[in-house]
């Protein structure tokens, strides 16, 4: 058994295809299949069920994946720790973030980090909080910035630090019927078309639970997955949005209105264990206390 075989097996599991896995690993399919077969022979079990249409994990394969991921993570950590002995940080730093990250100037931190550690390959992507939580659990990224409703703190089993706790406000266009109000309540918002993140997401739970707690039924006319969509729909006067106050402050051309008994959002930085050397350096660079 060697690390190449393990990488190949993980690629097949994630891609659910020998062809796509071979392309991802920059090898030919026959070579990848041969290495997988050797790995299965050494383990004494079959990792994948192969059909003409799909590839899926066997029960043995499902048991193999978590340990294989930890093994590769440990190998990467070993390389980075040896490299770090000379204060030379390399490798890849993968960061996931929500689109409404205002608790930290992420681009400014990344710019400074890159100038100090140019050998680190930085990868940044935007996603919804629940997907980012799962990515950290599966060690698909080195850290993530997520926003959750305060009642969902138990969704954070991994290492984490709270960055902000802020209220959500109503966001409307200047010509909107609610634009002249100093404050609004949830009943008033339920009476107008609303735009919100799609049902089931962490961002949506923040507002859903506020309306449920007040015993108010509402209808969301527009369901979106990125703050830019919300901003554009509000700007056109098609709907009112409910966003963190820090997001509203950036959108000065729109009108933000405090909500009586409105929902709140907490932003956290989360990361898996073991923490990669590049990720640890970035947290230090960003002033995020890893020790609490």
Image: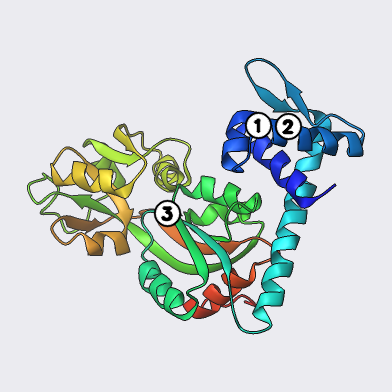
**1 and 137: which is toward the camera:** 1
Task: Name the residue rendered at 71%, 35% in the picture.
Answer: 31
Task: Name the residue rendered at 14%, 54% in the picture.
Answer: 181
Residue highlighted by disc 3: 98
What's the colour scheme?
A: rainbow
Residue pushed farthest left?
A: 175
Helix, strand or loop at label 2? It is helix
Of marks 3 and 2, the one in the foreground: 2
Task: Name the residue rendered at 39%, 64% in the picture.
Answer: 166
Q: Is residue 73 left or right of residue 151?
A: right
**260 and 97: which is toward the camera:** 97
Q: Give how far across and how far down residue 243 sits, in percent.
A: 31, 53
Helix, strand or loop at label 3? It is loop
Q: Of marks 3 and 2, which one's residue comes earlier in the chain?
A: 2
Residue highlighted by disc 2: 33
Neighbours of disc 3 within 10 Å: few (<14), some (14-19), many (20+): many
**216 and 113: which is toward the camera:** 113
Q: Of marks 3 and 1, which one's residue comes earlier in the chain?
A: 1
Q: Give how far across and how far down residue 128 sits, in percent.
A: 45, 47
Q: Give how far across and how far down residue 74 sits, in percent.
A: 75, 61
CA–CA distance in space, label 3 to label 2: 38 Å
The label on residue 29 is 1
Task: Name the residue rendered at 34%, 45% in the picture.
Answer: 226
- Asked if the residues shown at circle 2 and circle 1 are in contact, with their CB atoms under 8 angstroms apart, the answer is yes
């Amino acid at each position: 058994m060697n690390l190449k075989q393990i990488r190949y097996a993980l690629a097949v599991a994630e891609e659910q295809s020998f062809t796509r896995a071979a392309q991802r690993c920059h090898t030919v399919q026959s070579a990848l299949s041969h290495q997988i077969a050797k790995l299965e022979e050494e383990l004494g079990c079959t990792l994948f069920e192969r059909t003409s249409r799909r590839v899926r994990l066997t029960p043995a394969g499902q048991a193999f994946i978590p340990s294989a991921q930890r093994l590769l993570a440990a190998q990467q950590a070993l390389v980075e720790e040896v490299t770090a002995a000379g204060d030379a940080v390399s490798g890849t730093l993968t960061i996931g973030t929500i689109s409404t990250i205002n608790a930290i100037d992420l681009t400014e931190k990344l710019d400074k980090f890159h100038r100090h550690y140019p050998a680190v390959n930085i990868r940044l992507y935007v996603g919804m909080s629940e997907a980012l939580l799962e990515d950290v659990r599966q060690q698909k990224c080195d850290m993530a910035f997520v926003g959750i409703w305060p009642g969902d703190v138990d969704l954070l089993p991994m290492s984490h630090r709270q960055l902000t706790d802020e209220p959500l406000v109503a966001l409307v266009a200047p010509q909107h019927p609610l634009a002249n109000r100093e404050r609004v309540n949830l009943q008033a918002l339920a009476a107008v078309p609303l735009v919100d993140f799609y049902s089931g997401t962490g961002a949506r739970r923040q507002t859903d639970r506020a309306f449920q707690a007040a015993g108010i039924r509402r209808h969301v006319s527009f369901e979106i997955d990125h703050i830019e969509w919300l901003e554009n729909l509000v700007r056109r006067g098609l709907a009112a949005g409910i966003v963190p106050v820090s997001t509203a402050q950036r959108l000065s051309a729109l009108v933000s209105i405090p909500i009586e008994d409105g929902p709140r959002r907490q932003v956290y930085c989360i990361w898996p264990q073991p923490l990669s050397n590049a990720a640890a350096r970035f947290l230090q660079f960003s002033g995020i206390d890893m020790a609490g």
